[in-house]
Every structure is written in structure tokens, then in C-alpha cells.
Image (tube, rainbow, N blue to C red):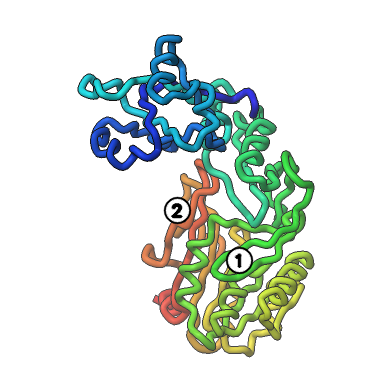
Amino acid sequence: MDTVCEKHTFSGIIIERRNLKTTIPLLSKHLLSKDKIPSIIQLNKSYETFTGKILDTEDTFLRLKQQFSIDVNDLYFSTNYLVILLNQAPTDLQAFPMVNFELTLNAKFFSHTELIFKLTNGCIQFSAYEVIGDIVHLNLTEEQQKYKKTIADTIYFKTGKTVINKTGKIEANFRFYHSEILAGPRKLTTIHKENDVKFFLDLEKVYWCSRLQSERIRILNLIKKNDVVCDPFCGAGPHVVPAIKKGAVALCNDLNPAAIDCLRKTLEINKLSCDCVENMEAKDFLFRIRDMHVNHFIFNLPEFSLDYIKFTECFKGTFWLHVFFFRKNNQSCQEIIKKRTGYAVKDTWLREVRKVSPSKSVFKLEVNSHEFFSFQKN
């Protein structure tokens, strides 16, 4: 990052600190207005994102020495002098001796997007990434992959967080993604805070998507105290743990033993308890609890969730279905669901959650069971 710098020269005036209050009103319409650059600079102060110096002729230096009775170089060591930067050299401020002031902006001045653009010679525009605790997760395009080390080093420089890059598709059964560590400490365990809960996560073994936080909040707002929430694909607990904290009863299961380990540690960290935490096939879990009353079923395994709706038919009472599934751009949600499940659905029960690629999205079927199963009989 040491190679990144930008030099800018601005018009300015040097004043004594004691005259600041009387001088500023006279200059208000001329003050420099640049993002992240102060219009008033203290000459003896060390700034994190830039350095500054007076650039001028010997005549200017002599004039400053006569005005302040101090050598120009000594101005940088005194607390008594300020530089006021201006948008341009005004013609109506003859009373103030003008100087040219050079600012050298270093790498810390720029955003990660600006740095990556500079370091790749304008080839890569990179902005969004996912933060999970003290780990940054990248999901780079094919073109960005060519510059993955530059991108990772830049983000580590700006955040101080370990940077990992997804290297393959999500593992279907245990639902985690293979990744590589590109920058920062070589660790994949972290504590991530969401919805006022601290989650223990091992990203080498479990799946997490921070981009679904708003959707999780939406479902959480539908859950009431003492409701029973069933999540047969609970993972590390992004849905069930906040629900437990809210006063709901959770029925938790996941096929991935590492996810269950993370869930148990999360419950312990947050001083919460859950009497039903299982590690088995989802259909076996649903069969085991078939006689229990449930208010909400959360099926967040988009590849297979639709296949499990049929296992809820035997549950008594009325409950909500929150079922996530994939849809490609050229497909109809109704046709997907009808083909996979045999069920018909209304448009009003369907909502796009997010895009996972230009041609593929996650949708959600959300409906009251009474309305859903009654509709099948029509």
C-alpha cells in the first residue's frame, strides 16, 4: 500500500491560532469543501491519512518570515499556526498572504473500492463483501479472481480482518462452502453478532450468510413469546437462537454435527437453553416430533426445502410455513413448486428474498397452513 499516494495542491493562507475566530467569518464562502479533507490544518499535527507542506517561492517564504517572525520550517513545530485551505485563490482577500499548500494523500485516505481500482490500474471495480465477525468473506467473479490477492490484501489493510474467498459450491448435505484464506490470521472461527445475539461460528464447517439478516428479522417479528418454532435445518442457529431469546420454544435439528456444536456454544455464550437440539435427517426429526404443536416451520435449505412440506401435513393445529427455495430466471415459482411437491400456490404467498447469481434467486413461500392446505382441495 506504500505505493499508493496522490498529491493535490490547494490555495491557502497561514494564520496564527489566536486569530482563527475573527478570520473564519471572512473566509466562510471560500473554505475548501472536499470530502475527508479538513479546511483547517494544524501545521504541527500528524494526520493519519495525509501529509502537508507549504509549496512556494523564496519570496513567499521570506514574506512569511517577516509576517510571523519565524522561519518557515519552524512553523511545522509550533502549535500556534494554522493553514486554512480554500477552494481557489480569491481576489477579494488581499489582506491575507496566499500560499500553495500540497497535500499528499496516503493509502489510508482512500476507500477499499478506490484502492483496488488504483492497484489494478482501473481494471477492477470492487465494493461489496460480507463481514462475519472478524472475518471478511469474498465471493469473487471470474474476472476478480485474477486480482484476488490484491483485493484481499487491500481489504485486510482497511479492516484488519481475516479475508477468505469462496472456492467452490456449497456442500449440499452439510451446507458449508469451501474457502481459502487470502489475507490475515489463519483462523476460521469467529464470534458474530446479529439481532442482539452472539453466534459462535466455524466457517470451515458451517454455513452463514449475513445478507439474510433482514429476512431473519422479518420472520423473528412474526414469532411471539411462547410460540413453538421448528427448524429442521437450523445450522448454527440464526433463526432459532433469537427466537429463544424472545421467549419462544425452539425445536432444533441439523444433519451437520459441526453446526450443532456451534449452536450449543452459541446458546452457552448467550446464557440460553433449548431442550430440543438434534443431529439427524430432517425427515426423521419431523417424524419424531409429529405429535407436538408447532407455530412456525422454517425450512431454509433452498436446494431441498420444498421436498419437506409434505412432512408437515400430519401436524395438528394451524402453523406458518416459511420455505426458502431456488428459482432460475427462466422458471415459474408455481411450476417449480407444483412439480416438486404437487401443491398449488398463490402469487401472494411468494416473495423474492435475494439474488445469488445473475440467473438465480432465492424465493420464499410464506403461508398459513390452514389457507395452504385448504387451497389444495379447491
Q: How many marks?
A: 2
Q: Quadrant of the N terminus?
A: top right
Q: Quadrant of residue 165?
A: top right
Residue furthest to the left in view is: 92
In front of the other: 28 or 141: 28
Residue 245, given in percent of the width and then of the height, sits at 58, 79
Residue 9, given in percent of the width and then of the height, sits at 43, 20
Q: Residue at x 52, y 66 (%)?
A: 216
Q: Residue at x 25, y 23 (%)?
A: 95
In front of the other: 242 or 48: 48
Q: Quadrant of residue 357?
A: top right
Pointer 1 with pointer 2, Cβ within 8 A? no
Q: Which mark is residue 332?
A: 2
Q: Which mark is residue 307?
A: 1
Q: Amino acid at mark 2?
A: Ser
Residue 320, given in percent of the width and then of the height, sits at 49, 77
How many residues crowd around disc 1 within 10 Å: few (fewer than 14), some, or many (20 or more)?
some
Quick one: label 1 or label 2, which is nearer the N terminus?
A: 1
Residue 235 visible in rendering: no
Callout 1: helix, strand or loop?
helix
Q: Residue at x 54, y 88 (%)?
A: 226
In front of the other: 337 or 248: 248
